[in-house]
Amino acid sequence: MFNKKRKEVLKEAASNHRESLRKNLQYRLEIARASGNQELVSQLEAEADYLRMS
């Protein structure tokens, strides 16, 4: 029972972490696009692709 609860907590923490990463990356992409920094946009898009694969 304890292990089941622990797994649920860990799964939720991982989900929250990924959501935080996604929001942060989205914000960084918006700023890079708004400033016209295409090199950074490309790097951030590559980071987004990597995170989707992980």
Image (tube, rainbow, N blue to C red):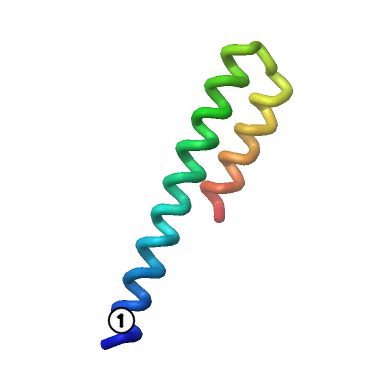
Quarter of the picture containing the C terminus is: bottom right
Query: Residue at coordinates 53% horizontally, 21% vertically from top-left?
Result: 30
Q: How crowded is mark 1: few (under 14 residues within 10 Å), some or many (20 or more)?
A: few
Query: Going by the image, does 40 lie left or right of 21?
Result: right
Front-lying residue, 21 or 46: 21
Task: Report the residue that reaches farthest toward the right.
Answer: 39
Q: Residue at x 40, y 53 (%)?
A: 16
- 16 versus 6 height, above or below: above
Q: Which residue is drawn at 52% across and 47% down?
A: 52
Left or right of 13 in this view: 52? right
Instruction: Determine the image quadrant of residue 12.
Output: bottom left
Q: In this view, does 24 lie above or below 3?
A: above
Can you give x and y, in whole percent of width and height, for residue 44 in the image?
63, 33
Could you say where residue 38 lies in the image, as x and y percent from the top left?
69, 18
- Judge whether 5 appears above or below 44 on screen: below
* Three-letter residue code for mark 1: Lys
Picture quadrant of residue 14: bottom left
> In the visual, does 3 lie left or right of 34?
left
| Residue 53 at x, y percent in the picture | 55, 51
43, above or below 39, in the image = below
The residue drawn where x is 69% and y is 17% is 37
Q: Position of residue 29 (x, y in %)?
A: 56, 26
Q: Residue furthest bottom?
A: 1
Q: Check the picture and name the quadrant holding the N terminus.
A: bottom left
42 left or right, relative to 13? right
- Number of numbered discs visible in the structure rendering: 1
Label 1, secondary structure: give it.
helix
Which residue position is annotated with label 1?
Answer: 4
